[in-house]
Amino acid sequence: MMTIKYILQKEFLQIFRSKAMIPIIFLMPLFQLLILANAATYEIKNISFCVVDYDYSNNSREFVSKFYATNYFLLSGYYTSVKEAEEELKTNKSRLIIHIPKDFEKDLLLNKNTKVQFLINAENANAAGLIMNYSMSIVQAFNKQIITETVNYNTSNLQSGIYITYSNWFNNLLNYKTYMVPGILVALVTLIGLFLSGMNIVKEKETGTIEQINVSPIKKYQFIIGKLLPFWIIALIELAFGIILGIIIFNVPLIGNPLLIFLVASVYLLLILGIGLFISTITETQQQAMFIAWFIMIIFLLLGGIFTPVENMPDWAQTIDIFNPIAHFSKMIRMIMLKGSGLRDIGESLMLIGLYAIVMLFLATIRYRKKT
């Protein structure tokens, strides 16, 4: 134990000796959390739109007002022709054109069918889908208002006997930050653990101190524990600070047991540190280790369900995610924080993470050859 203690002292001295590393390890992840939690969202606001109104009636103007009365749309102007308005789409000055035909009001008042055309910039398919959904909800609300005013009785009399009510569980305000902050915490903790552990032993190789360690009486397991434990502790501290920031600044709920979060994180970090250690044993320079770690990280991150649901991915991607630690950890931390899930609910994912951790640590230990 004394040997491990001395190695830990040496590792912490090395970490805190570098003044440049301290803000990178402790401050940058917190800044990234503050920035990404606000930037990584699928909500769209301030959608610029223009109007081509061939009717020039009270109802057409009222219909347009329904759009810029919301927090989602900004009116950029009126145009006399669709062709002229299309230039706005081509130059990205507008993302939506509302084309109102002639006799729009007349057809509405005579209870005839009338049409409104939406031209949407669909370069970003997800954004175009959201714009269409927002627009259709406004059209439906306007349509009900017109029916109420013209028929002169409540629209519920026009409906069938089936009424729909709904309630949102676990995120009743539909706040996207509530969903994103736990996922971003997963990404930051993974980043810290994987990159720091991946470049640790490689740094010893580059500086030449690995030869002194190899001929020392330090046993292999003592060396590996002493190398990995500091980053395990640092990553858990980062997670604790991140959760506190998420609760205070973003009002993210913590319904489940905090100790269960750290239990899951402790097992998960053993796996990430094992991957980092394995990378460090197969590379000779920090540059090589960084590129390999980033290659693995970006694949795990994009397939991990942090930004897009795993259920929406192709079958082959969902199969890969069985071996993706980020997918399991992001799922578990969201279940604990937002749903209050217990150990029984996350048991299968936790056992998989634990099994993967044992395998990776074993491979890394076998791969590291200490010459005495």
Image (tube, helix red, strand yellow):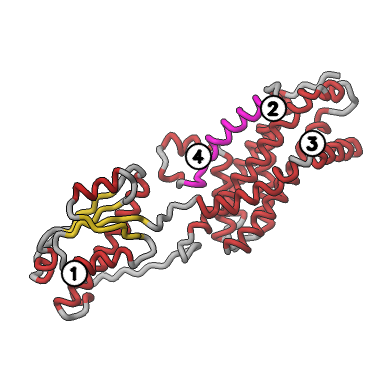
Whole-Å distance between the Cαs marked 4 and 1?
46 Å
The numbered mark at residue 225 is 3
In the rendered structure, which amino acid carries the disc numbered 3? Ile
Q: Which mark is residue 286?
A: 2
At 66% across and 27% down in the image, what residue appears? 289
> Is 349 on the left-hand or right-hand side of 237?
left
Query: How many neighbours does mark 2 have within 10 angstroms: few (below 14), some (14-19), or many (20 or more)?
Result: many
Is 30 placed above or below 165 here?
A: above
Identify the mark nearer the N-term, 2 or 1.
1
- Which residue is found at the position 59% from the left and 58% from the top? 337
Find disc 1 in the rendering and name its residue: 59
Image quadrant in which you'd find residue 275: top right
Q: Label 4: how many residues lie within 10 Å, few (<14), some (14-19) or many (20+)?
A: some
Counting residues from the start of the chain, the first of labels 1 and 3 encountered is: 1
What residue span does the magenta drawing correspond to?
Answer: 286-307
Q: Reply yes or no: does residue 304 show up in magenta.
A: yes
Query: With respect to residue 296, does 339 lie above or below?
Result: below
Task: Measure how far apart labels 4 and 3 are at the Cα level.
Answer: 30 Å
**Among numbered discs 4 and 1, the one appearing first in the sequence:** 1
Question: Which of pointers 2 and 3 indicates the residue nearer the eye?
Answer: 2
Q: Work out whether residue 362 or residue 312 is closer to the camera in this orientation and state it.
A: 312
